[in-house]
Image (cartoon, helix red, strand yellow):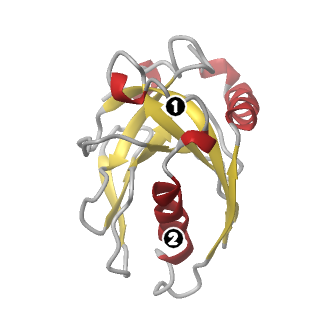
Amino acid sequence: MYIDRIAVGTHFPDDVNVIVEIPMHYNTVKYEMDKVSGALCVDRFIQTAMYYPCNYGFIPHTVAGDGDPVDALVITSYPIMPAACIPTRPIGILLMQDESGPDEKIIALPTTKIAPEFAHIEDIEQVDPLLKKRIIHFFNHYKELEQGKWVKVEGFESKKKAMTYLIDAASKNEPYRQ
């Protein structure tokens, strides 16, 4: 896979491509895409008996505070296989801190063309409250058994805040934006 050839999105920031690393409800292996080779590598085994509540991946041509591409959670009805690229529309952002500093995650839905069942959801406030609780619970606890690792979830913010964050993150990678 040539990650550098995958656009940040067609109508950025209203839509963004997400490269899935970990499918929802999958096993407890934490995968990360090697951004140079495109290989899907095992980062570590999650020590808690927990599964990602949504598909997890990253947005190409963005740079988060940790120097990696921006993380994203994609809410779908189905798991998406690792290394797949899915066009999404951001609806919010999860603010959190971990042992390395800020670790925000964009919350996104597939584009309406791909998943029309989510067309009525425009902002994180419209997402099922139980799913939001599951997301917060997962991130508050998934590193508990890993020595020296911790997470503090601060909560969800609006689509507007997510868009501002994405524009800033893409500007840090300007030479490579498509």
Residue drawn at x 70%, y 29% is: 163
Amino acid beneath label 2 = His
Q: Is residue 42 above or below residue 125?
A: below
Q: Which mark is residue 121?
A: 1
How crowded is the residue under tag 1: few (<14 C-alpha within 10 Å), some, or many (20+)?
Answer: some
Residue 52 on image: x %, y %: 38, 60
Amino acid beneath label 1 = Ile
Q: Which mark is residue 137?
A: 2
Can the viewer see residue 22? yes
Residue 27 on image: x %, y %: 24, 65
Q: How many marks?
A: 2
Residue drawn at x 56%, y 11% is: 11
Q: Is residue 68 above or below residue 109?
A: below
- Which quadrant is the C terminus positioned in? top right
Q: Which mark is residue 44?
A: none
Query: Is there CB contact under 8 Å for labels 1 and 2?
Result: no
Residue 49 on image: x %, y %: 32, 79
Secondary element at image label 2: helix
Nearest to the eye among marks 1 and 2: give it: 1
How crowded is the residue under tag 2: few (<14 C-alpha within 10 Å), some, or many (20+)?
Answer: some
Residue drawn at x 66%, y 44% is: 64
Hey, which quadrant is residue 3 in on the image?
top left
Secondary element at image label 1: loop
Q: CA distance from mark 1 to mark 2?
A: 22 Å
Residue drawn at x 25%, y 46% is: 79
- Which quadrant is the N terminus positioned in? top left
